[in-house]
Structures are given as C-alpha cells and as structure tokens.
C-alpha cells in the first residue's frame, strides 16, 4: 500500500464525500432544463457559482508557473534538481499543467453567449457574498500561500470535468439548440459551441491518460507532509462544494429571480 500513487490516494480519501456531492448535483440537473426550466437562467446561476473555483485556481496556477513557453518540456522529476522548496513546488505545478484543461476562456465565452438569453443575466449573482465567492477568495488568498495544495484542486476539478462532464453534457444537449440560443443552421450543437463550450475537451480520453501520468510524475517531487496536506485539502474542496450546491437551492428558490415569467 505504501507504493499507491497520489491519484489513487485522493480517490480513496474522497470516496464518500465525492459520492455525496455527485448525488446532490446530479439530482439538480433536471431543474435547469426543460420542461422544468423555460430558459437557461438556473443553469447559468449554477455554472457561475462553480466557475468561481475554476477561475480562482487557474489564476493562481498561471501566476505561479509563469510563461509556459519558457519551461514546457524542460522539467525534471528529481527533487535534488531544484535549489529550493519554492522551485520544487513550482515544478510540481508545471508538471501537471495541460493547456487543454484550462476553462477560463471557455467560461467567459459561455457567459457572453448566455447573457442575451434572459435579462436577469446583467448580474447572474445578485447576492454578492456567497459560498462560491468565499471559496474563490480562499483559493486566491490562502491556498496561494501553500501552492502544493493546488494539486488537489487541479486533480479534483478537472477529473470532474473529464469523468462527470460527458454525462452532464448529454443531459444539456437533450434540451435542444433553441434552448441554448442556437439554431441548426448556425452551429452543430454536438460540437459544443458557446454557451456549452465549458464541457468540451478535445481528445478527452488522451488528455485523461496524460493528465494522470502528469500527476503521478509530479507526486515524485512532493514531500510526505505535502501529500498529507493535499489529501486533507481534497476533503475541504468537497465540503465547500456541498455548501455551494445547498446555497444554490436557497437562491434558486428565492429567485423566481432567474426564471423569466
């Protein structure tokens, strides 16, 4: 058991918490779509909350790794290759970097496409402070000071996209192009143009395999205390995701808000 890799350790630690959050979120997908929903307003609200996690982690991640063109393909997985812990942890974050995973630009394009579909999108988050914005603040302010913790965020959030994304994508496509402000003449909805581009990962199976290999390689650069902290942080991620979803229930219930009459 001592040789188990980091992805497998994370999977074991989060099994129960992941199952709970997955059930909560899966049960709520039909509420965002016809016949329960007349517009993508509730979907937009939910996406805007979970987007905070991706936007926060990608900002911190990009700030820490620097310009990828300067170091891509030139990494060592030997801890002794690095002069300081800061350099070593930076190498960890560079090792797990795959540009294909990044979602920030896709989210921006999706929200731009969703905004015209209902007037309420002038500000999809009318409440200001919420569990999602607090989570983003925590990532940008606290996690950034212990950057090895980003390994937990990167692995969990993009694994969710790669593994759970296809199921969610299939449900969203069932709503039809008109629901998403598209027409058959304008775009092939199965190609996932905005406002659904968040869910598209080109060559997903290849990316999934490369991603795991990268995290396994990065694990060789981590210390045992760092691994333990990453496992603890993995549980914190799911605790906060559960709060986001439960708060969304309250906000959506108040928010005839987000459903045009």
Image: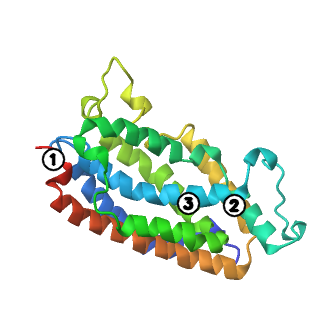
Crowding around mark 2 (Cα neighbors within 10 Å: few <14, some 14 to 19, many 20+) is some
Which of pointers 3 and 2 lies earlier in the amino acid sequence? 3
Determine which residue is flagged by label 2.
Answer: 64
Could you tell me how far apart the alpha carbons at marks 2 and 1 are, in whole angstroms? 43 Å
- Give left or right: position of 192 versus 253: right
Tell me the distance, in whole angstroms, between the alpha carbons under discs 3 and 1. Answer: 32 Å
- The percent position of residue 15, horizontal first and vertical second, equals 45, 71
* Relative side of 236 to 148, left or right: left
Q: As displayed, is residue 164 above or below residue 224?
A: above
Disc 3: which residue: 57
The residue at the far bottom in this view is 225
Per the rendering, the mark at residue 36 is 1
In space, the residues marked 3 and 2 are separated at their CA atoms by: 11 Å
Q: Is residue 9 above or below residue 154?
A: below
Task: Assess whether mark 2 and mark 3 are in contact (beta carbons under 8 angstroms).
Answer: no
Q: Residue at x 26, y 58 (%)?
A: 27
Q: Which residue is painted at 66% across and 70% down in the image?
A: 148
Which mark is in front, 3 or 1?
Answer: 3
Q: Nearer the viewer, residue 126 or 253?
A: 126
Disc assigned to residue 6? none
In percent of the image, x 73 and y 72: which residue is there? 222
Q: Is residue 220 visible?
A: no
- Of 70 and 237, the residue lying toward us: 70
Mark nearer the N terminus (2 vs 1)? 1
């Amino acid at each position: 058991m001592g040789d188990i890799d980091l992805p497998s350790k994370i999977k074991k630690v989060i099994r129960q918490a992941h199952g709970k959050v997955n059930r909560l979120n899966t049960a709520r997908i039909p509420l965002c779509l016809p016949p329960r929903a007349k517009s993508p307003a509730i979907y937009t609200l939910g996406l805007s909350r979970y987007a905070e996690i991706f936007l926060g982690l990608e900002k911190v991640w990009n700030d820490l790794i620097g310009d990828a063109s300067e170091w891509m393909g030139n990494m060592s997985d030997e801890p002794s290759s690095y002069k300081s812990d800061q350099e070593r942890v930076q190498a960890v974050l560079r090792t797990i970097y795959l540009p294909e995973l990044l979602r920030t630009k896709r989210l921006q394009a999706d929200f731009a496409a969703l905004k015209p579909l209902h007037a309420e999108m002038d500000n999809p988050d009318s409440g200001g402070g919420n569990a999602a914005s607090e989570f983003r603040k925590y990532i940008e302010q606290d996690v950034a000071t212990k950057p090895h913790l980003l390994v937990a965020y990167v692995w969990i959030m993009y694994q969710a996209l790669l593994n759970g994304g296809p199921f969610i994508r299939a449900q969203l496509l069932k709503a039809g192009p008109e629901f998403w402000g598209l027409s058959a003449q304008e775009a092939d909805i199965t190609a996932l143009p905005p406002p659904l581009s968040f869910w598209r990962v080109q060559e997903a199976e290849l990316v999934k395999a490369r991603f795991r290999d990268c995290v396994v390689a990065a694990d060789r650069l981590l210390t045992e205390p760092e691994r333990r902290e990453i496992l603890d942080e993995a549980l914190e991620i799911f605790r906060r995701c559960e709060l986001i979803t439960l708060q969304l229930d309250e906000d959506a219930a108040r928010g005839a808000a987000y459903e045009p009459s």
